[in-house]
Image (tube, grey):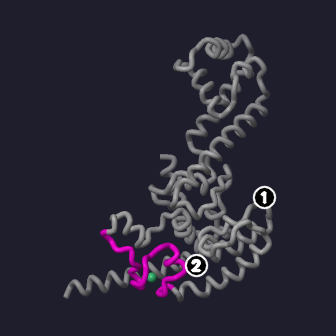
């Protein structure tokens, strides 16, 4: 339900990979949020007076209950082991301050989920254009509009669908249908409609593409000349997710220029291509139905 809700906010299809949802939204999975609460509650108990019922219960259960017991304290102990917070019994006898405990819990849980979600994200071929950066608490710059203008905000869903491999082209339809549907581009009929064909090559989209593409090339080369990347810059990757080449911690200026200049151009290009393709397809469908009426 929680995942479905975030997907709706980000206008993503329900079948998009969960790891994409978390990297884009910067939210923690609900499971992790529940773990934070449970482990913090244990922290409260550890700081309670030694003669309080909760503290005494914790002490007894942590000492004697086996791993498979259904005691709440044992469940929390198992949870903590998962996050490499070991020896709860020691914390019970030498409790950390509220601040230290919360800080420890947050860093352990964030570390665990960051590496888990990044690993999962790398495993999806549909997410090959994502940069596999997961910053808990920060929305991914691909999902942020630098202006509050509704016209700009409207361009985000198409951009996110393309970046997460969720924008359906003829080649996707062909593979879903086990090639009952042709992968050939319906607009030009000259090649398979892959994401490269759609964004860079289809001649029917040339008009929507040329002006913005040259701006992207000009600005992109200026901005990215300021960073050293160990790998060559790939145009399709740059358009689908320019943040792949930019690290906010390494160079703040380049990151801001990418967000304020390059990303809006890429987003505009994808939006224009999408609208043009959509209009042409609607026309083709209309002609098709007219023919079949004869
Ligand atoms: Zn084409």
Q: Is mark 1 within 8 Å of ligand 1?
A: no
Report which residue position mark 1 lands on: 249
User: Residue at horizontal 54%, vertical 53%?
Assistant: 123
For the C terminus, the image quarter is bottom left
Between 95 and 150, the one lying in front of the other is: 95
Q: Quadrant of the rendered structure where residue 253 is?
A: bottom right
| Residue 68 left/right relative to 230 | left
Q: Residue furthest left?
A: 294
> Residue 232: x, y in percent?
69, 71
The nearer-to-camera label among 1 and 2 is 1
Residue interval drawn in magenta: 180-205
> Residue 82: x, y in percent?
62, 32
State the SS at label 2: helix
User: Residue at horizontal 56%, vertical 50%?
Assistant: 120
Report which residue position mark 2 lands on: 269
| Residue 270 left/right relative to 286 | right
Q: Quadrant of the rendered structure where residue 93 is?
A: top right
Q: Is residue 279 magenta?
A: no
């Amino acid at each position: 339900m929680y995942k479905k809700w975030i997907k709706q906010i980000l206008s993503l299809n329900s079948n998009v990979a969960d790891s994409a949802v978390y990297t884009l939204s910067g939210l923690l999975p609900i499971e992790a949020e529940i773990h934070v609460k449970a482990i913090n509650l244990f922290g409260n108990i550890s700081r309670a007076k030694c003669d309080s019922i909760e503290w005494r219960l914790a002490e007894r259960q942590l000492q004697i209950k086996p791993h498979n017991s259904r005691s709440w304290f044992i469940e929390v102990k198992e949870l903590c082991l998962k996050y490499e917070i070991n020896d709860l019994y020691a914390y019970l006898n030498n409790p950390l301050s509220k601040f230290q405990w919360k800080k420890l819990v947050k860093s352990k849980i964030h570390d665990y989920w960051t590496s888990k979600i990044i690993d999962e994200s790398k495993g999806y071929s549909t997410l090959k254009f994502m940069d596999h950066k997961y910053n808990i608490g920060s929305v991914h710059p691909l999902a942020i509009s630098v202006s509050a203008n509704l016209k700009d905000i409207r361009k985000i869903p198409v951009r996110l669908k393309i970046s997460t491999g969720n924008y359906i082209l003829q080649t996707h339809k062909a593979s879903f249908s086990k090639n009952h549907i042709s992968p050939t581009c319906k607009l030009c009929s000259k090649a398979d409609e892959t994401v490269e064909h759609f964004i860079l090559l289809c001649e029917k989209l040339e008009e929507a593409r040329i002006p913005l593409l040259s701006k992207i090339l000009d600005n992109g080369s200026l901005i990215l000349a300021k960073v050293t990347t160990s790998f060559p810059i790939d145009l399709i990757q740059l358009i689908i997710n320019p943040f792949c080449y930019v690290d906010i911690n390494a160079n703040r200026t380049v990151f801001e220029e990418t967000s304020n200049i390059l990303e809006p151009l890429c987003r505009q290009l994808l939006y224009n291509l999408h609208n043009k393709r959509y209009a042409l397809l609607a026309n083709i469908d209309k002609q098709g139905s007219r023919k079949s009426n004869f």
